[in-house]
Image (tube, rainbow, N blue to C red):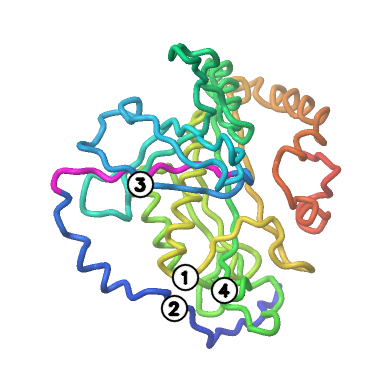
C-alpha cells in the first residue's frame, strides 16, 4: 500500500485589489431596460482573450440578431496601425453570470477584415477572416462532417498563480511544496489549493449554459481541471473558449491568474494540457467502432508533426516523456 505524503498549508494570503463591497452597491440598480452584451474574442497570440461591452436596447432572441461590431486590431496584434479596424461577428451567446440581475449576455465572436469598397460604395472585396481567426476554417470542417455528428469532450488543465509573483497559488514564496502524490483529486487544506476559485468558476459556467461536465484537482499542487462536453461540432470550441474566459474573469475577483501555460514550473512537476476526446457516428457504432477508431488514428499518425505544431506554443516543455509521452510519439 502506498504511503501518502504529508502536505502543508500556507500562511500566504492573496487579497483582491479592490473592495468588492463598494461595487455591490451598484449591482441592483436598474438598467432602464438596457442589456449589456460582452463581446469576447481570441486575441493576436491565438491564446489570449479580449472583450468589450456593447449596450443593446433589448436582449436578442438569437445570436444572428446581434450587430457586427469592431475594434482596434493594432492594439491586439491583429492588424497594422495604418489599417487597424477589425470586425467582430457574433457566433454564440450565453447568459452573463457577472452582471446579475439582468438579461445581460456574453457573446463569443470571431474576427474579420472589413469589406473593401470603392469610391461609389460598392463592395470590391468581401469581409474575410483575419489570420488569427482559426474558428472560420474549423467551422467549415464541422459543416462538412455534420452528418457524422462529431462529438468533442475537452479536458482543460490549468494552474492558479499568485498574480503578484506569478508563482503557483499556495506554494512557499521562496521554495517548493512537498512532492506530487497527495494533490490529485484531493480534499483538505494544503492539498486542494484554491478550491473557492474552482467552485465559483464551476457555478459561472453552469449559469452561462456551458456544458461543463466536471472539475477536479490535478497532480501538481495549485493545478486544477475542468471538462466541457460532450458537445457537437463547432459549439465545443465556442464553449471551451468561453469557459476559459469565465475562468479569467473569476480570477480577477480573487486577484489570481488561471494560467493555461503547458509547463508553468520547470522540473519534476506536471504540466497542463487541453485533452480532446473525439467520437463520430462511425466510431460509436456497435460492432465496427473500434476498427474505425484505429483507422482514424492511422490518419492522425501520418500528420503528427503538423498537428503538434498547430496545438500551440510550449508543448515541447510539457511532452517530455514524464507523464505524457514524448512530443515525437503518437501512441494509443
**Which secondary structure lies at badge 4?**
loop
Labelled pair 2, 1 in contact (Cβ < 8 Å): yes
Measure the C-alpha gap from mark 3 to mark 4: 30 Å
Query: Which badge, 4 or 1, comes first in the chain's sequence?
Result: 4
Query: Closest to the observer: 255 or 11?
Result: 255
Q: Is residue 291 magenta?
A: no
Query: Which badge, 4 or 2, comes first in the chain's sequence?
Result: 2
Q: Which residue is mark 3?
A: 53
Query: Which badge, 3 or 2, comes first in the chain's sequence?
Result: 2
Q: Position of residue 151 (x, y in %)?
A: 54, 30
- In the image, which residues are magenta? 32-43
Q: Which residue is mark 2?
A: 15
Measure the C-alpha gap from mark 1 to mark 3: 22 Å
Bin the neighbour count of mark 4 within 10 Å (Cα to Cα): few under 14, some 14-19, many 20 and up: many
- 86 displayed left or right of 80: left
Measure the C-alpha gap from mark 4 to mark 1: 11 Å
Q: Which residue is mark 4?
A: 169
**Which secondary structure lies at badge 3?**
strand
Q: Position of residue 58 (x, y in %)?
A: 20, 36
Q: Main secondary structure of the magenta part?
A: strand
Measure the C-alpha gap from mark 2 to mark 1: 6 Å
Q: Position of residue 146 (x, y in %)?
A: 53, 18
Q: Give the number of the disc on residue 255.
A: 1
**Which secondary structure lies at badge 1?**
loop
Measure the C-alpha gap from mark 4 to mark 2: 12 Å
Amino acid at each position: 500500500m502506498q504511503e501518502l505524503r504529508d502536505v502543508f498549508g500556507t500562511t500566504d494570503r492573496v487579497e483582491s485589489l479592490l473592495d468588492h463591497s463598494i461595487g455591490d452597491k451598484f449591482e441592483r440598480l436598474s438598467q432602464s431596460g438596457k442589456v449589456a452584451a460582452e463581446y469576447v474574442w481570441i486575441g493576436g497570440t491565438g491564446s489570449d482573450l479580449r472583450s468589450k461591452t456593447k449596450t443593446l436596447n433589448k436582449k436578442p432572441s438569437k445570436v444572428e440578431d446581434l450587430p457586427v461590431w469592431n475594434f482596434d486590431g493594432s492594439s491586439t496584434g491583429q492588424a497594422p496601425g495604418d489599417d487597424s479596424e477589425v470586425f467582430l461577428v457574433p457566433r454564440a451567446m450565453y447568459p452573463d453570470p457577472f452582471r446579475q440581475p439582468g438579461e445581460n449576455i456574453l457573446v463569443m465572436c470571431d474576427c474579420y477584415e472589413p469589406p473593401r469598397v470603392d469610391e461609389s460604395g460598392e463592395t470590391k472585396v468581401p469581409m474575410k477572416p483575419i489570420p488569427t481567426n482559426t474558428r472560420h476554417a474549423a467551422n467549415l470542417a464541422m459543416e462538412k462532417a455534420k452528418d457524422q455528428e462529431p462529438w468533442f469532450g475537452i479536458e482543460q488543465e490549468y494552474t492558479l498563480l499568485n498574480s503578484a509573483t506569478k508563482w503557483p497559488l499556495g506554494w512557499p514564496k521562496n521554495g517548493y511544496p512537498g512532492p506530487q502524490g497527495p494533490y490529485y483529486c484531493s480534499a483538505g487544506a494544503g492539498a486542494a489549493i484554491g478550491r473557492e476559485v474552482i467552485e465559483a468558476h464551476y457555478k459561472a459556467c453552469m449559469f452561462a449554459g456551458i456544458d461543463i461536465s466536471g472539475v477536479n484537482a490535478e497532480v501538481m499542487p495549485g493545478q486544477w481541471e475542468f471538462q466541457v462536453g460532450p458537445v457537437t461540432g463547432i459549439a465545443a470550441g465556442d464553449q471551451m473558449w468561453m469557459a476559459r474566459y469565465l475562468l479569467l474573469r473569476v480570477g480577477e475577483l480573487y486577484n489570481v491568474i488561471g494560467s493555461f501555460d503547458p509547463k508553468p514550473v520547470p522540473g519534476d512537476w506536471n504540466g497542463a494540457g487541453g485533452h480532446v476526446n473525439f467520437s463520430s457516428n462511425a466510431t460509436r457504432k456497435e460492432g465496427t467502432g473500434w476498427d474505425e477508431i484505429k483507422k482514424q488514428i492511422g490518419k492522425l499518425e501520418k500528420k503528427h508533426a503538423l498537428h503538434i505544431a498547430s496545438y500551440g506554443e510550449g508543448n515541447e516543455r510539457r511532452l517530455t516523456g514524464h507523464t505524457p509521452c514524448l512530443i515525437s510519439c503518437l501512441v494509443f
